[in-house]
């Protein structure tokens, strides 16, 4: 069933965007249906910024926001180009809103079939001085060409006036700036995504057994996502046993779980266009081995210290720097590295075991939009920002110089953090992460 009404929050986002950019036009392309093989498509998922501004979730569409004379209390017009109603296509692929629904349900001032986009856009953009359009995105070559043709026509219209084409800007920066500060309804949705993801990780911790396949665990986790109401994953689940966990973006998920190894699960449910991003690492058997326990406790220590730093005014680089210091102290005392801490940090020698960053923004995209710097400085954390804290430890299979007891270990612990007025809320605190709590769940 198609929605018959949408939350007024989408219009208020457009109002806010256009209030800050009077005189500018925004052109946002939807995602396309992409072929996976022959006539089978990948599941469609709307572009996050287009969804953020409209709630529109059909493919082959465009949103155009244009400066206009004041009407209905605003200084802009919203135009949607959408696939028109088509009984034959809808019989095969499902119901569409069509141009009628784009106006009556989604609040467009005008709507046209997508086939009219290239013809109408030059007229719509006439006289606009600044156009926000994201050039150079994969699969959008045709729209890029249309935009270039629009600029070409604009220049022709100017005649011999000496005027140039409108300035072109990337909309993701300004929309990303809005998306970075999560509103109450976004936080509510993120909390739900986090709760169902936390439950799924906990269930995997209870059900995993030696001899199972990584694929079995993926099925347990994703079954719980769907049962919780998640429409799809925020990203492909990583279910990595033993040395597979040292591959940061491991995707095969098709190996046997062996007693004595660790199992790393990095998986997040997407719910109503917001995703969680949780990682836990627990023993395939009942307990962590002594060597696994030492490095696990070290990663956990660095993660808990990072969590304690998460409050308004802190920065992600300062949190990362602290995580690196804690990990480096541990690497040195466990004999994994030699030298002085400052030297190991300065030369990046620690990256042998901790090659990635500690945090990224989280929201509609797992690596969400939003600038990491402001005026050349790392930006200060503020209430409403959501990000991950995810330190890890990995000994690459080719690293045969590492002490034998630590070889092939991969560990990551990842939670989703909301900055509040007074500190932070760990939105994924519901999944056990101390060894004691985890081993209690592994007592089969
Ligand atoms: N799951 C992707 C990440 O942790 O960044
Ligand atoms: Mn992450
Ligand atoms: Mn992750």
Image (tube, rainbow, N blue to C red):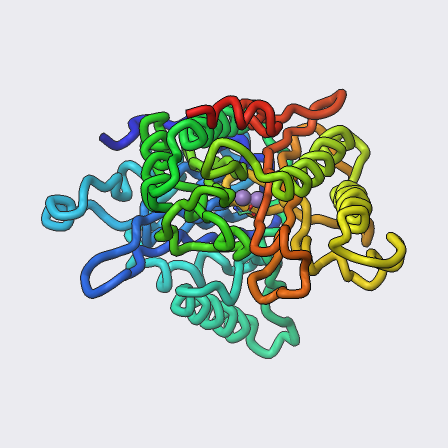
* Residue placed most toward the observer, 152 or 257: 257
Q: Is residue 265 above or below residue 64?
A: above
* Residue placed most toward the observer, 17 or 357: 357
Q: Is residue 192 left or right of residue 303?
A: left
Q: Is residue 283 left or right of residue 403?
A: left
Can I make out residue 206 in this image?
Answer: yes
Figure disc tally: 0
| Residue drawn where x is 81% and y is 54% of the image | 376
| Residue drawn where x is 59% and y is 45% of the image | 411
| Residue drawn where x is 82% and y is 63% of the image | 347
Measuring from the top left, give residue 116's x and y in whole percent.
31, 58
Q: Quadrant of residue 18?
A: top right
Can I make out residue 374 in this image?
Answer: no
Q: Is residue 83 left or right of residue 385?
A: left
Measuring from the top left, give residue 333's x and y in whole percent.
80, 47
Q: Quadrant of the C terminus?
A: top left
* Residue placed most toward the observer, 16 or 162: 16
* Residue placed most toward the observer, 318 or 401: 401
Measuring from the top left, give residue 299's x and y in whole percent.
68, 40
Q: Is residue 29 left or right of residue 379?
A: left
Q: Quadrant of residue 362?
A: top right
Measuring from the top left, give residue 202's x and y in whole percent.
46, 27
């Amino acid at each position: 069933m198609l929605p018959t009404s949408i939350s007024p929050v989408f219009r208020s986002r457009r109002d806010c965007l256009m209030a800050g950019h009077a005189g500018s036009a925004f052109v946002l392309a939807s995602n396309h249906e992409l072929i996976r093989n022959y006539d089978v498509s990948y599941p469609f998922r709307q572009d996050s910024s287009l969804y953020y501004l409209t709630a529109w979730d059909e493919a082959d569409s465009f949103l155009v926001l244009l400066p206009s004379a004041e009407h209905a209390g605003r200084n802009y017009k919203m135009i949607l180009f959408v696939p028109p109603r088509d009984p034959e296509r809808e019989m095969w692929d499902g119901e569409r809103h069509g141009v009628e629904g784009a106006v009556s349900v989604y609040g467009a001032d005008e709507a046209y079939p997508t086939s009219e986009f290239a013809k109408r856009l030059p007229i719509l953009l006439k006289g606009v001085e600044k156009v926000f359009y994201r050039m150079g995105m994969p699969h959008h070559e045709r729209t890029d060409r249309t935009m270039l043709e629009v600029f070409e026509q604009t220049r022709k219209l100017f005649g011999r006036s000496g005027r140039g084409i409108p300035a072109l800007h990337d909309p993701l920066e300004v929309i990303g700036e809005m998306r970075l500060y999560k509103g109450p309804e976004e936080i509510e949705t993120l909390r739900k995504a986090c709760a169902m993801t936390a439950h799924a990780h906990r269930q995997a911790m209870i059900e995993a057994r030696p001899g199972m396949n990584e694929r079995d665990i993926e099925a347990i986790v994703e079954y719980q996502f769907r049962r919780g109401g998640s429409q799809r994953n925020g990203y492909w689940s990583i279910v990595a046993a033993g040395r597979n966990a040292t591959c940061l973006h491991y995707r095969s998920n098709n190996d046997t779980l062996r007693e004595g190894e660790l199992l790393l699960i990095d998986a997040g449910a997407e719910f109503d266009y917001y995703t969680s991003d949780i990682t836990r690492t627990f023993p395939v058997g009942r307990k962590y081995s002594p060597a696994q326990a030492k490095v696990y406790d070290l990663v956990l220590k660095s993660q808990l210290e990072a969590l304690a730093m998460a409050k308004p005014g802190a920065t992600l680089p300062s949190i990362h720097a602290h995580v690196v210091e804690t990990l480096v102290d541990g690497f040195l005392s466990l004999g994994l590295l030699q030298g002085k801490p400052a030297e190991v940090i300065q030369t990046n020698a620690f990256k042998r075991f901790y090659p990635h960053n500690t945090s990224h923004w989280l929201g509609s995209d797992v690596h969400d939009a939003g600038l990491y710097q402001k005026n050349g400085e790392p930006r200060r954390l503020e209430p409403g920002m959501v990000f991950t804290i995810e330190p890890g430890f990995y000994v690459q299979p080719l690293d045969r110089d590492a002490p034998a007891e630590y070889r092939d270990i991969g560990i990551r612990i990842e939670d989703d953090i909301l900055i509040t007025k007074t500190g932070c809320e760990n939105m994924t605190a519901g999944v056990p992460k101390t060894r004691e709590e985890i081993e209690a769940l592994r007592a089969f």
